[in-house]
Image (tube, helix red, strand yellow):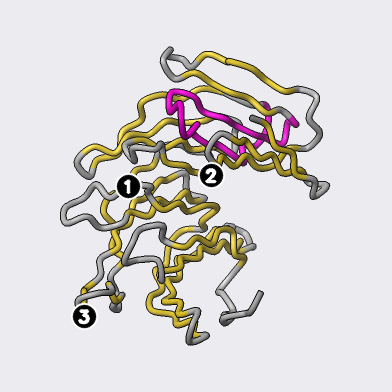
Amino acid sequence: VLEVGSCILDGNADAVEFCPHESFYNVLAASTYVLQEGDRPSRSGCIMLFDVDAEAGQLELIQKVETAGIFDIKWSPRLLQNPGCPLLAQADADGSVRIHSLQGSDSDGSKCMVSWNNLNELCGKCISSSMCLCIDWNSSATSMAVGLSDGSVSIISLDESQLNILQEWKAHDFELWAASFDIQQPMLVYTGSDDCKFSCWDLRDDPSDLVFQNKEATQWEFVVLQKALVILILYSQVAMMNT
């Protein structure tokens, strides 16, 4: 493993993600969170966009977007907007979900070169008075699952640049740090929380039905889906895989 480059971010790095779409593979997004203490505490953050050239060993900062404190970001798995720009979803400390559109220009006919100031906010919506801690797209990139600091989960739809709350329910007793759609069965959502429970929910009912709940887990923090595997990461740095 070779280090391509490094950059000191303006705050705590809560999420780092490469864009998964062809012609944008070189784009890396990093989000930050900073707690400003005092009589009136506030939470600020930013999205920093990088152009990564692994062969040349270059990591170039191309854009910085000031925002509220961000706990999670996620690139959309599909290109839906005309002319097919990647979308970046943001879950922030103000209880809002924001969608950014990444636009590039093909300068050499073969590779989409990222230019300055090309990450633009497409839409946003305050969905809760609680903090948004995590976010995940469904496989068709039409809905998102959002975990909240009060233990609730919200299902948000994206329809013609509009965000709407489809469902919301109390899923856990403490902060909900992970919410992920099942890739093969998008009607199922997995959640993980500080209450040491790993749960699965069926969205075909409203409110969503609990399919199963693992109460034997100890301090689950994250749930990550990859194909048919559910990967659970514990505070103790032990990873477990379920099919």
Question: Along the polypeptide, which appears first: circle 3 or circle 2?
Answer: 3
The residue that disc 1 covers is 78
Image coordinates of residue 216 in percent, x first then y, are 80, 24
Q: Quadrant of the C terminus?
A: top right
Taking depth in this image into account, of 126 and 162 the one nearest to the observer is 162
Image coordinates of residue 10 in percent, x first then y, are 55, 74
Instruction: Report, in whole angstroms, how far the alpha carbon at label 3 lies from the one at label 2.
Output: 35 Å
Query: What stretch of residues is rendered in magenta?
Result: 173-196
Q: What residue type is labelled 3?
A: Ser
- Local packing at callout 2 (Cα closer than 10 Å; few below 14, some 14-19, many 20+) is many
Q: Which amino acid does label 1 sit on?
A: Arg
Look at 50% across and 65% down and name the residue there: 30
The residue that disc 2 covers is 134
Image coordinates of residue 5 in percent, x first then y, are 57, 82
- Is residue 191 one of those drawn in magenta? yes
Say above or below: 149 vs 79.
Answer: above
Q: Is residue 217 left or right of residue 58?
A: right
- Is residue 62 one of those drawn in magenta? no
Taking depth in this image into account, of 109 and 48 the one nearest to the observer is 109
Question: Along the polypeptide, which appears first: circle 1 or circle 3?
Answer: 1
Instruction: Report, in whole angstroms, how far the alpha carbon at label 1 lies from the one at label 3.
Output: 23 Å
Q: Which mark is residue 107?
A: 3
Q: Which quadrant of the figure has residue 19?
A: bottom left
Instruction: Report, in whole angstroms, how far the alpha carbon at label 1 lies from the one at label 2.
Output: 19 Å
Camera-near label (3 vs 2) is: 3
Taking depth in this image into account, of 203 and 97 the one nearest to the observer is 203
